[in-house]
Image: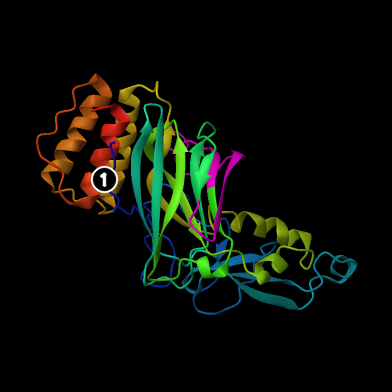
Amino acid sequence: MRAVKPALCFVLLLITSASGGALQEPVTAGLSDFPVSAWPSDGTTPVVRDKYVFVDAPKNEYVLAYPENLGTAAFEKNGPGSLKIARYELQRNVEPEVSVLISAVNPNTYRYSYTVGNGTAAKQSIDQFSLVAPEQVGTIIKGPAGWFAIVQRGRTFKISNPDWIKTGAAAAWSFERPEAFIQPGSRKSGFELESSLKPGFTIGYFRKAPAVDIRVATSGFIPDAVKVQLEPLLGIEYNSKTVLLLGPKFARNTADRTIASDFLQGVTFLTRTKQLNGDSEFVKTLTGELERFSREGPPLRLTPQPRGDAEIEVFNALKIGIGM
C-alpha cells in the first residue's frame, strides 16, 4: 500500500500591516479581503452612509453600527436615530495544523486520512472542518469520536483562482459533543474520506462553531439592510481560517500533465509562503521538472531525494497522482 507520511500543514498566510491589521498583499488560495470595511483602529466610530457592518480583525470581531430606527417609518420621516453598536465574535481565531495520509484502498479508491491540530496561539477551539472537493468526490466519509461527517452536494465556494481549485461539493466534519472540540495545543485524528479521485491541492476551512450571539445577530432582531451586508461576511470563505492542503481532486483519466501543473502551482505557493524551502535542491529540481513535465510529459527526473516531512508528503502525493 502506498501512503503519504502525515506531517505537513499548509496554512495560508494573511500578511498584516504593523499599524493594526489591515491586509496587505495577501498570499492566499482563498479570498484575500473581507467583504466589508475595517473598523477604525483608533477607536473612532465611522460615519459611513449606508454601511452598517465592519470588521475589527485584531479583536476577531465584527461590528454592527446602524441607526436604531433603521427600516422603520420614523427613519424615513425623521432621518437616522441614535447609533446602535453591537460587537460579535468571528469564528476564525484558530490555528489549524493539518497533515494527511493518502493510501490506496484498492486500484480504484484512495483513502484520505486527516489529522487536525490547533496551535497553541489559537484563541478558539476548532469545531468544524470543511474540505472543498469536486462533485464526484464520493460518499464514504467518517469522523473521529464525537464528530459527525457528511458529503454535501451542490456546494460552490468563492475562491481567488477558480481555474485551480475545483469546487462542487464539500466533505464536512462538525462536532457532536463539546468535549470533542480541538482545543488550542491539541490535535485529533480520524477525519477520513474515501474517493476514486487522485490527490491535488485544494482548500480546507477550519473554524469554531457558531455561537448563540451570532445566530441572534442573523435572526430577525436586526434590520434587513444590515442583514444583507452581514450575510456574506459570515460565509465560510471569510468566517473561518483557510488552509491549502492535499485532497481528492482529479479523475483517474486526468492527463498527467494537468496534475503536474496543479502540483507546480501548489509547490510554488508553498515556496512563497516558506512552507517549502526554496533553497532545497529537491524543491528546486521538483519545480523545474514540474514545469517541463507540464509542457512535455514524462519522465519526471528527480535525482535529489526529498528531505523532511513537507518534501516527503508532497513527493509521495505526486507519486500517487501521476503514477511514478
Q: Is residue 5 visible?
A: yes
| Residue that appears at 52% across and 34% down | 138
Q: Quadrant of residue 178?
A: bottom right
Nearer to the camera, 3 or 205: 3
Location of mark 1 (residue): 313
| Residue that appears at 27% across and 47% down | 5
Residue 140, horizontal then vertical, whole percent: 52, 39
Residue 37 lies left or right of residue 187; in this view the side is right
Q: Quadrant of residue 247?
A: top left
Task: Quadrant for the N terminus, please.
Answer: top left
Q: Amino acid at mark 1?
A: Glu
Task: Quadrant for the C terminus, please.
Answer: top left
| Residue that appears at 9% across and 34% down | 303
Q: Is residue 180 above or below residue 140?
A: below
Q: Is residue 18 above or below residue 269?
A: below
Residue 164, horizontal then vertical, whole percent: 42, 36
Is residue 148 in the magenta section?
yes
Local secondary structure at mark 1: helix
Residue 113, horizontal then vertical, whole percent: 40, 47
Nearer to the camera, 94 or 111: 111
Q: Please, which colouring scheme is shown?
A: rainbow
Residue 84 lies left or right of residue 308; in this view the side is right
Nearer to the camera, 184 or 4: 4
Q: Is residue 115 above or below residue 199?
A: below
Residue 303 lies left or right of residue 221; in this view the side is left
The boundaries of the magenta stretch are 143-171
Q: Is residue 158 visible?
A: no
Is residue 255 in the magenta section?
no
